Amino acid sequence: MNPLSRDELVYGFTPEPGLVAVEHAPGETADAMTLFLRRNGRLSTRQEPFSPFLWLTKPDWLADLKPAPEILRLAGSNPFRALARFPTWAALEHALGHLRKATGRTPSDPGAPYFVLRDPVQQFLLDTGRTSFGGLLLPDLEFLFLDIETHSAPDRDFSNPDREEDRILSIALADGKGWEHILDGHELDEKALLETFVEIVRKRDPDVVAGHNLFKFDLPYIAARAKRHRLPLALGRDGSAAESHSSRFTAAERTVAYEHVHLHGRQVVDTYLLALAYDVSHRAMENHSLKTVARHFGVAAPHRTYIDGRQIAATFRSDPAAFLRYAADDIRETAAITPILLNASFAQSLILPLPLESICLRGNAGKVESLLLREYLRARHSIPAPEPPRTFEGGYTDLFFEGLARDVHHCDVRSLYPSILLREGRNPRSDPLGIFLQLLAHLRDFRIEAKKRARDPSLSPAAAGRWDALQATFKILINSFYGYLGFPQARFNDYDLAAAVTEQGRDLLRGMVAKLRELGAMPIEIDTDGIYFTPPSGLDAKALDRFQQDFRSHLPEGIEVEFDGRFPAMFSYKMKNYALLEDDGTVVLKGAALKSRGLEPYLRDFLREWITLTLQGRAGEIPAMAARRRAEVAGRKLPVAALAKTEMLTDAPSTYLKKREAGGKSRQPAYEVAIHSGRAFQAGDAVAYYVTGDKKNVPVHANARLAVGFDPSNRDENVPYYLAKLDALIKKLDARNPETTGTNDDQPTLF
């Protein structure tokens, strides 16, 4: 086959303007795919034939299969040298059953002599070289934003759809273009509310249904309540019900179990999961609730209505107007954060042979692999098997200083590992076509072009935003190529190449640290490809520019550094945990240790205030602040919500009890509270509890009580216990309290 142009290799080799969705249409003798196309504001559909396929190490594995599939022998010497095609997906599944028996290996087994992609839509996009949304901007799509409010009894911490009385109180809807509608439980019973919701979805016919925590809460809740009313949720474009399956989403160290819901002909997007992915690199959010995300992006209305989750049902009954204002503000914030969080995934849809909702959930290694497989499939070339997993030394991270630093700068090596790969010109050993480096070089060039276009003053804000999203997307994908080399499931992985690139990166970064010190700067922390440091004191603008030029001059060709941040102050706590003071006074916390959800809210509040005073040069106010906080605890002035921990029950209490009695579980406060509460808690319920008693050292599981049962007129929280926890935090932080006398504000201050 002829080699592809740069555009075809990156954007796909079969342009299909306006493609918003693809759906599998099974047939008895031949399958097809339904294409949903939005052009000039109108939606149309058409069907195309589809022949499912799988790769084999040798055709003999299917020699006895009847009817025999079409077998194509592939070029090259990679292990998977045959491609088998089938008339229907059912025939493919029949072949997989045959292969399981013949080989003794399942499709997910890395050692299986066959390889299959179990998603027919991905297969079709790969095979035909199509990508989504060509010629469209994000505002060209029809959105439906969704947010529900639900009932929870006064003695419960969280709604549960399996509990009869926990009905849906409202469904707020919007399209992001001015239309808003709230289905109000004051006016409609739950069945009528759900019926009207289905009617609106069918009438408005959105391309994308989006919401915050849609997969873990809203859609499963709606499905459970509709099932209770025997109401079919015909939300698909073909009138079909929602499809769902259990899945997991991983963002750095965090894994979230959720129910993946798909609506025929539509893309379903959960901004909660997008926020988790966004915060992996930014580490700037204390949590990922809708309110926190909206405040982070500056889209929260200045006078929006806030209602504590435990008070929603009570407000619904006592103050309907406030309840409806709250629901309206929630849906407006949902509509506001979605394009911000979705822009990168939308831009990736222009490149990747995957549907949008899969791109939102798929790891970066899988995205890189889809680009490689697309070209190997087009070229009818054999594909490799993954190398067996093995370890190698990682990137260079180091902490040089703990404490308070003033006038902190940040420099970042622009795409460190990809730059080394391109400079060395090395492809993975199993990539004889050299697609890996071609893609990497093209994406780098496209990013440079996209950054230039994003700054074009003649473009509309929407068009400029599209180019900015593209350049950000290219950056993400570019930086993913190195990680792909060391990913155990990657078919084109190459551990030797990954190790060699990492070694060069470590050497380069150590040289950068040495150069900073040579120039009189003080490094604070280095994390893989970025360095926080304080420059020599007393530099004016010209001298700072010379300092940066001198630093860049020692770098090898092909390695570029961006000086991309300057902060009045930084509190370095420990590796990958620090706080930054921005020019406007905003304090940004980075790292789990400074945002620990394991701390009670009153401790998190104290920690943030301590850091804020420290960064703002007001450390002298800390003793008075600490005394005030202690007095609040000692005087029983804090609301129980500030003292309570909230935990989700992953097991039913009865299951936990069986495990505990069998010796497989230690006593856990949330479960013990649930068991002894006399209330019917279930798996999935949230339990908020506080600690009672009069001694600081008490077994928490025996002294925990439900927060909803707290009596403000007869307070029984364990003051010594909560004071001891606060004092321990104060002592820990006081050990790092910066000296505030005789310091040079231009240099770090040791603790």
Image (cartoon, grey):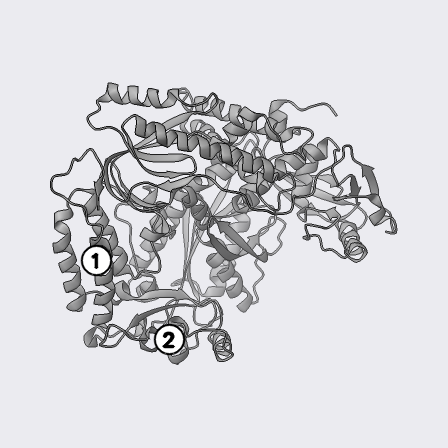
Q: Is residue 1 left or right of residue 615?
A: right
Q: Nearer the viewer, residue 152 or 119?
A: 119
Q: Is residue 268 left or right of residue 294?
A: right
In the rendered image, which quarter contains the N terminus? top right
Q: Residue at x 21, y 53 (%)?
A: 735
Q: Which residue is mark 1?
A: 730
Q: Residue at x 47, y 29 (%)?
A: 471
**At label 2, which amino acid type do we have?**
Val
Q: Nearer the viewer, residue 620 or 270?
A: 620
Q: Residue at x 38, y 53 (%)?
A: 289
Residue 533 position within the rendered picture, expressed as x and y whole percent measured from the top left: 30, 34
Q: Could you tell me how far apart the alpha carbons at marks 1 and 2 are, in whole angstroms?
A: 29 Å
Q: Give SS at disc 1.
A: helix
- Residue 605 in view of the camera: yes
Q: Is residue 434 above or below residue 654?
A: above
Residue 434 position within the rendered picture, expressed as x and y whole percent measured from the top left: 65, 28
Q: Which residue is mark 2?
A: 673
